């Protein structure tokens, strides 16, 4: 204990920003063009290249958050009052709140306790004549069962928008999340995500109409792209507003970070995998349920490392977090399920018994630090503290 507290606090998460990112931001600041412009455009192209390039048929639309991207995707799909959208209770509120922005209703369902991902059978059971879309989350960076979900969506004529805030890079049967065949996939570049622009996100889609609508709605409902294409002779000051859009564009300052973060995404993922592997081997004999591994050959983004206390554990989840904190180690809980938050609970009269797997996972889980700036000694410090507390 004493030796632990003599060390500086090990935060739960830290971004890894290198000199190249900093130089690119400075270049942007000196360039005279600091908001959405050439670098945001380059970032969109680089992102599609990362997912496989033109052959994927994808378009990338840079936005200032994943929340914005989820909102834009569902708006473009025409989700509105009277519609229902099914998602997991075991997520961050952003996944669901965007449905309410549009006046549609959220139907929360339980998870598969093995993966903590949305359970396709629970989704199927929740489908009503009002259901329009499913929003799966690739929880912690492990791909959701998209094979089942896409088949279900096809059978019932539903749209699918993937919340891929944790899933860069994640693969399912060798295919990167983003290319799996849903209507749209949305990534987050929030400060603690696997790559970051401080705040930011990327919407990718193969649907040209969805892409066009999202581009227009991203910037006030300005129909400038179409205008440019069809009336190139009119002076550039002219634009038309075709809808009451939003202010969701990504700045070039943020895109400057993104261009370099993206180049490092694979290296970041390898380091995260290394740390996850070390945790797995170090915790194998402890009363812990360790996070599921991806299928052989598939990538897990390891955005989060979530352990669940087993029945025989000598401490409660809350006590464990407290003791880790006393040892100078930050941790967190992902997530307080949506059905426990007053807004969601009261609006839909939700009870924990409706979500037994999420409830149980929530009560026993904590997220340990896992990020690329952790050195091996940091990882060992977490290992030793966890082993001491549970030993
Ligand atoms: C971080 C996160 C979001 C929101 O991302 P922002 O870029 O901060 O809007 C949405 N869903 C999940 C699951 C997240 O973890």
Image (spheres, rainbow, N blue to C red):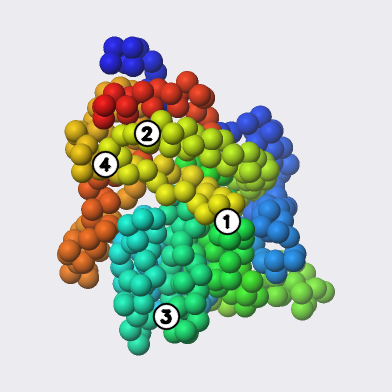
Marks 1 and 4 in Cβ contact (< 8 Å) = no
Secondary structure under the numbered disc 3 in the rendered image = strand
Residue 151: percent from left, percent from top: 49, 77
Residue furthest to the front: 285
Which residue is the site of mark 1?
A: 171
Which residue is the site of mark 3?
A: 132
Marks 3 and 2 in Cβ contact (< 8 Å) = no
Would you place residue 137 above or below residue 255 in this image?
Answer: below
Left or right side of 201 for 93? left
Label whose residue precedes the other's in the sequence (3 or 1)? 3
> Separation of disc 1 and disc 2 at Cα?
25 Å
Structural crowding at the residue carrying mark 2, measured as other residues with C-alpha within 10 Å and reported as few (<14), some (14–19) or many (≥20): some
Secondary structure under the numbered disc 4 in the rendered image = strand
> Separation of disc 3 and disc 2 at Cα?
42 Å
Would you place residue 169 above or below residue 13 in this image?
Answer: below
Q: Which residue is drawn at the image coordinates 24% and 63% (left, top)? A: 355
Question: Viewer-nearest of labels 4 and 3?
Answer: 4
Count numbered badges in the picture.
Answer: 4
Structural crowding at the residue carrying mark 1, measured as other residues with C-alpha within 10 Å and reported as few (<14), some (14–19) or many (≥20): many
Residue 190: percent from left, percent from top: 49, 46
Which residue is the site of mark 4?
A: 309
Residue 94: percent from left, percent from top: 39, 58
């Amino acid at each position: 204990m004493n030796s632990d507290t003599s060390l500086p606090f090990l935060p739960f998460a830290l971004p890894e920003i290198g000199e190249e990112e900093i130089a690119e931001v400075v270049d942007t600041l000196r360039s005279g063009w600091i908001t959405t412009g050439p670098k945001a455009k380059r970032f969109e192209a680089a992102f599609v290249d990362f997912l496989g390039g033109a052959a994927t048929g994808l378009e990338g639309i840079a936005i200032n958050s994943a929340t914005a991207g989820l909102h834009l995707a569902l708006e473009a799909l025409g989700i509105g009052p009277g519609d229902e959208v099914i998602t997991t209770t075991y997520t961050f509120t952003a996944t669901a709140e965007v449905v309410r922005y549009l006046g549609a209703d959220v139907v929360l369902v339980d998870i598969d306790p093995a993966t903590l991902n949305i359970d396709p059978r629970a989704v199927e059971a929740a489908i009503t004549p009002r259901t329009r879309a499913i929003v799966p989350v690739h929880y912690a960076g492990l791909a959701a069962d998209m094979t089942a979900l896409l088949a279900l969506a096809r059978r019932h004529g539903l749209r699918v928008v993937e919340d891929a805030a944790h899933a860069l890079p994640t693969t399912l049967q060798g295919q990167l999340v983003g290319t799996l065949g849903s209507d749209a996939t949305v990534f987050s570049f929030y400060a603690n995500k696997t790559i970051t622009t401080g705040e930011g996100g990327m919407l990718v889609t193969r649907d040209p109409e969805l892409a066009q609508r999202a581009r227009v709605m991203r910037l006030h409902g300005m129909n400038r792209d179409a205008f440019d294409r069809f009336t190139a002779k009119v002076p550039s000051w002219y634009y038309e507003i075709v809808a009451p859009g939003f202010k969701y564009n990504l700045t070039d300052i943020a895109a400057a970070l993104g261009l370099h973060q993206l180049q490092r995404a694979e290296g970041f993922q390898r380091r995260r995998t290394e740390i996850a592997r070390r945790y797995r081997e170090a915790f194998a004999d402890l009363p812990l349920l360790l996070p599921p591994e991806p299928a052989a050959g598939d990538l897990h983004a390891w955005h989060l490392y979530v352990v669940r206390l087993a029945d025989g554990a000598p401490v409660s989840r809350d006590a464990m977090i407290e003791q880790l904190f006393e040892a100078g180690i930050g941790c967190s809980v992902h997530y307080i399920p949506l059905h426990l938050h007053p807004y969601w609970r009261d609006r839909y009269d939700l009870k924990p018994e409706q979500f037994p797997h999420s409830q149980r996972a929530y009560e026993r889980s904590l997220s340990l630090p896992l990020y690329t700036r952790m050195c091996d000694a940091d990882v060992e410090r977490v290992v030793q503290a966890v082993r001491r507390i549970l030993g």
